[in-house]
Each structure stands twice: as structure tokens, then as C-alpha cells.
């Protein structure tokens, strides 16, 4: 006696993907995410380069303006060469009023892109300038004020900002206004 048994199994795999299809999908999602992260990283670096450029220009121009304006003031007979400048440190510039020992300190923080100006001795003067990226991240602008909490937009041109701030700071060192 011979029994014949025929078994047939059908597995419904509609909607299930093979391992190879799933790994292809995951790999495609990973590649897309990796590309997006790369683009975001490039944009972040570009924004940092732009703001760093704005800070560098401000530092160079502010030092140039302070030195030039102090030199011009020293030539005035009423002032009589009492302003001594020291721009040897890239992180800090100092102008000393030699008749009183008072000084104007200009501290540059490249990491934060902030300039802190403080006058010690004659008047209680302080001023802060910060470099910020504009909305599109393609340029920078400067904000300034007595404290970080009360800053406002003071312009986009390092030359103009430096000229105005240097003038105001030297007047404070001389005890004017």
C-alpha cells in the first residue's frame, strides 16, 4: 500500500519586502541624510567664515582708527602728546593717557566675535560690539551698546563703525562727553 501525500504551503508575502529591498531603502535614506548633513555643515562653515571676516575687518579697522585718531589728537597743542598707544597684542589694544595713568582697553574675542571697550580712570565708559550674520547668512552686520542686553544695529561697514566708536571712545578717555 502506497500513500501519496502532497503538501502545499503558500505563504502570503504581499507587502513584505525582501531583506535586499529593505537594506536598499535604508541605504538610500542614509545617503540622503548624510548629504543633507553635509550641506548643513557646509552652510554653517560658510556662515562662520563670513562672520569671521566681519570680525577681522572690524578689529583691523578699529585699531587703525584708534591709532590714527590718537595720533591726530596728540598733535593738538591743547592735548600735548599725552596718548600712548599699544597695539602689539592681537587680543587687546591699549591707549594710555600718560598725564593721569588712565587707559582705554579694547579687548577682542575672536571666538565670540565680540569687542569690549572699557575706559578706566577718567570716566565710567564701556561699549560692546558684536558681529552677527544677516538673515540670509551671506553678509554680516554689527550691533553695539553699553551691555550685551541693550545692543542695537550700528551698521554693516567696518570703516564707519570703527570711526564712530573710536571717536566716542577717545572722547571718553579724554573726559569729554
Image: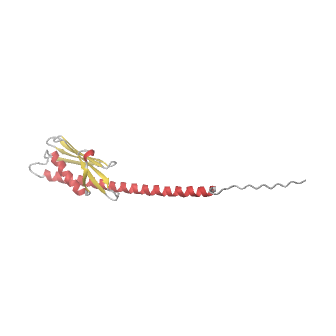
* 161 vs 39, nearest the viewer: 39
Residue 17 x %, y % = 62, 56
Q: Examine the rendering and report whether any part of residue 22 can be seen.
A: yes
Question: What residue is at 22 percent from the left and 54 percent from the top?
Answer: 162
Residue 128 x %, y % = 25, 47
Q: Residue furthest left?
A: 78
Residue 177 x %, y % = 13, 46
Question: What residue is at 40 percent from the left and 57 percent from the top?
Answer: 43
* 13 vs 130, nearest the viewer: 13
> Left or right: 6 with respect to 71?
right
> Left or right: 133 with respect to 20?
left
* 142 vs 12, nearest the viewer: 12
> Left or right: 36 with respect to 86?
right
Residue 18 x %, y % = 64, 56
Instruction: Report how many numbered discs are placed on residues in the image.
Output: 0
* 121 vs 28, nearest the viewer: 28
Colour style of the rendered protein structure:
secondary structure
Q: Examine the rendering and report whether any part of residue 67 can be seen.
A: no
Amino acid at each position: 500500500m502506497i500513500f501519496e501525500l502532497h503538501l502545499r504551503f503558500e505563504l502570503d508575502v504581499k507587502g513584505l519586502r525582501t531583506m535586499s529591498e529593505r537594506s536598499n531603502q535604508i541605504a538610500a535614506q542614509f545617503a540622503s541624510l548624510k548629504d543633507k548633513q553635509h550641506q548643513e555643515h557646509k552652510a554653517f562653515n560658510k556662515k562662520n567664515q563670513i562672520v569671521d571676516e566681519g570680525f577681522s575687518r572690524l578689529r583691523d579697522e578699529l585699531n587703525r582708527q584708534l591709532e590714527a585718531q590718537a595720533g591726530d589728537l596728540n598733535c593738538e597743542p591743547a592735548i600735548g602728546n599725552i596718548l600712548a598707544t599699544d597695539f602689539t597684542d592681537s587680543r587687546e589694544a591699549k591707549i594710555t593717557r600718560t598725564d593721569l595713568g588712565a587707559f582705554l582697553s579694547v579687548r577682542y574675542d575672536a571666538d565670540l566675535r565680540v569687542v569690549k571697550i572699557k575706559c578706566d580712570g577718567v570716566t565710567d565708559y564701556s561699549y560692546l560690539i558684536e558681529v552677527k550674520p544677516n538673515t540670509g547668512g551671506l553678509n554680516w552686520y554689527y550691533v553695539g551698546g553699553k551691555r550685551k542686553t541693550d545692543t542695537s544695529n550700528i551698521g554693516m561697514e567696518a570703516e564707519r563703525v570703527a570711526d564712530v566708536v573710536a571717536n566716542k571712545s577717545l572722547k571718553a578717555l579724554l573726559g569729554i562727553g
